[in-house]
Amino acid sequence: MINKVLIANRGEIALRVHRACKEMGIQTVAIHSTADSNAMHVRMADESVCVGPPPAAQSYLSIPNIISACEITGADAIHPGYGFLSENANFVQIVEDHGIAFIGPSAEHIRQMGDKITAKETMRVLGVPCVPGSDGGVATYEEAHTLSEAIGYPVIVKATAGGGGRGMKVARSASELETAFRTARSESKAAFGNDEVYLEKYLDTPRHIEIQVFGDGKGNAVHLGERDCSLQRRHQKVLEESPSPAIDAAARARIGGICADAVGKMGYSGAGTIEFLYENGEFFFIEMNTRLQVEHPVTEAVFSVDLVQEQIRVASGLPLSFTQDDLVPKGHAIECRINAEKLPNFSPSPGKVKTYFAPGGLGVRMDSAIFDGYVIPPYYDSLVGKLIVHGADRPLALARLERALSELVVDGIDTTTPLFHQLLAEPDIQTGAYDIHWLEHWLARQG
């Protein structure tokens, strides 16, 4: 069994991993930049190591410094959280080469799923439905034009190494394709150092549905239902819920079974998420995230499991603590991402938190690492908390969310909390009648 875990992250996810470890009797090591020396995850951990100055490239992304922190403290495992190095195959290989356990999938699987074209081809072979598109990278505009005519407009040009909405451009007609193609390649080169792109059919009103999967690395795997992540701004998720208002039990069982079968055949180890676009009753694979997701708490609420503890168990060589038959969903859960951003432009709002009060009560969970007097640094992601609610059904979950949002106090900085008050008043949100474009259109109407 793993004895000491170095948490290679910061903020609320570092605190989340620490809590899971403590309940299992496992010692924790926090790493931090000089900007985070007073952070809550540092205060809570059994040990802490400063790994560099504020810029992430010199601290949270510094592989030599993180490995050194493991050697100094005697940590026998690393949990990467999400973001930073969580899907860096080179990092995983170096960790394993140093005899340290990586709490996550193998470097091979991270590399395989990190390349969008390879991931799509792998999933197609494993029987997972995919969006119609090119079989591989598209090198020239002329090739893109021929393929687009065959696929049918609209099409979307995507960076092979993309993520976070960068290197993605939509062409609704042949006249728009050349600009979309060249812009996507240029953005991809600038953001990822790789200008390879591919083409897919663009769906007009899809929902973003993701399936939580878990494998033991020995061919056994399960799924834990779906999360609906369709409320997005600039391809960034804002609110997630489970189960999806648009998916029935039969569809859930069908796509969940397909996904569990696929990751079992891969020999995948640990937590993973297979993401789809869903339209007119059909699922289309878009990517697989080989890590824990920001929105994992909604799945934990619905299935009454601790996904982080399960990650640690599997990384320790233990079997899954549940079977597919054990995983019976109960109720409805919703998560709001609370960011330190100033509305309506969503500009970053770092600064000192004067007063913080977390909502509570039955079915309410607040994952946050802020506190009275905490200074939010300007160097990192703007996420400062996740408000998760759970109820017997969706109407109760929505009512509970509205109540919890009214209790939340974060003074001294601007947050996105007012956005959720507005959204909950919208009939489409109350009924669940939204798609991945809904929020962008709604924001445009607000002026």
Image (cartoon, helix red, strand yellow):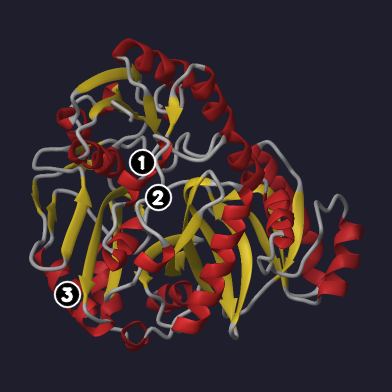
Relative to 355, does residue 141 appear above or below in the rendering?
below
Q: Nearer the viewer, mark 3 or mark 1?
A: 1
State the quadrant of the C terminus. Answer: bottom left
Indicate the secondary structure of the residue bearing disc 1: helix
Indicate the secondary structure of the residue bearing disc 2: loop
Residue that numbered label 2 is attached to: 320
Residue that numbered label 1 is attached to: 313
For residue 108, side relative to residue 78 (left or right): right
Residue 78: image location, x then y, percent: 39, 29
Q: Earlier in the sequence, mark 3 or mark 1?
A: 1
Residue 66: image location, x then y, percent: 41, 20
Residue 300: image location, x then y, percent: 30, 60
- Judge by depth and name the residue closer to the eye, 396 or 311: 311
Tell me the kind of residue under disc 1.
Arg
> Does the rendering let one see residue 247?
no
Relative to 303, does residue 151 appear above or below in the rendering?
below
Q: Label 3, label 2: how many angstroms apart (C-alpha)?
A: 32 Å
Q: Label 1, label 2: how many angstroms apart (C-alpha)?
A: 8 Å
Q: Quadrant of residue 311?
A: top left
